[in-house]
Image (cartoon, rainbow, N blue to C red):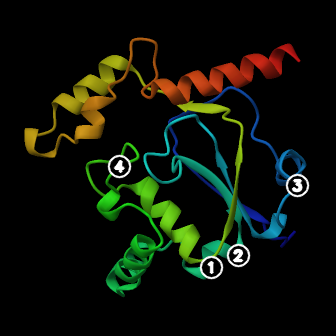
Amino acid sequence: SGQRYRDIIYSRSDLYWLLPHPTREDLHRLEPGGTPEETVWIPQTGGDDWGGLYDKHFMSPRWLARSGIFNDLDLVTSGIAADWFSAAESRGIAKHGEGQRAGYGVNTEIWLHIRLMMAGLNYQRFPPMAYVTCVPDQWRAHFNAKPTTVKHRYSSAFPCTEQGFRFPSEHAAATEFADCEYLS
């Protein structure tokens, strides 16, 4: 029909959804502050922000995709990212991601927060409805096949559990909300 989508969703393909994804209208009813056409919606997982904002899933207005705010390569190679990190540091964002559970340096959660902050974009949180899922034997085989030099400290800190999830606080938050929603 030629009609464009209003929103884009960035999401990991290994998220397991316990409830259907809410629409923009559903989200705006949860948190009526701000303008829906200018709000980025990010799940509140109760601890997986790692000094920034949860980056495994978010919903944003489509126009942001064209704005270049999510084009990491251009932001880095043009020097804009370096300028933004300097500006963020002067605003109190921890230097090199130190503190706030991000003691190993800059991570993708901090980078998402800085991009939204420096672009002056509004973000709102919504209840967690999904968690990163995995198959333990497959995860271990994939992880163990990597050379020691590239085994990332975050990956080794959060191996796939026998219950089939990787991040305990994310899993707990999503299942708790889904249980409450199911009982209501």
Q: Nearer the viewer, residue 99 or 1?
A: 99
Residues marked 4 and 2 touching at CB (< 8 Å): no
Relative image position of residue 108 (x, y in whole percent): 41, 56
Give the distance between the C-alpha atoms of the residues marked 1 and 2, in whole angstroms.
5 Å
User: Of circles 4 and 2, which is in front?
Assistant: 4
Q: How busy is the neighbourhood of tag 4: few (under 14 within 10 Å), some, or many (20 plus)? A: some
Reading the image, the residue beneath label 4 is 99
Q: Residues within 10 Å of mark 2 (few under 14, many from 20)?
A: some
Alpha carbon distance from label 3 to label 4? 31 Å
Q: Amino acid at mark 1?
A: Arg
Quadrant location of the C terminus? top right
Q: How many marks?
A: 4
**Residue drawn at x 28%, y 55% as measured from the top left:** 105
Tell me whether circle 1 and circle 2 mark residues in contact (CB < 8 Å): yes
Q: Quadrant of residue 17?
A: top right
3 above or below 80? above
Q: Which residue is mark 1?
A: 66
Dot label at residue 63: 2
Identity of the residue drawn at 30% across and 62% down? 96
Q: Looking at the picture, how far across and down is residue 142, in whole percent?
A: 25, 31
Which of the two discs, 2 and 3, labels the residue nearer the N terminus?
3
Which tag is nearer the camera, tag 4 or tag 1?
A: 4
Q: Disc 4 or 2, which lies upstream in sequence?
A: 2
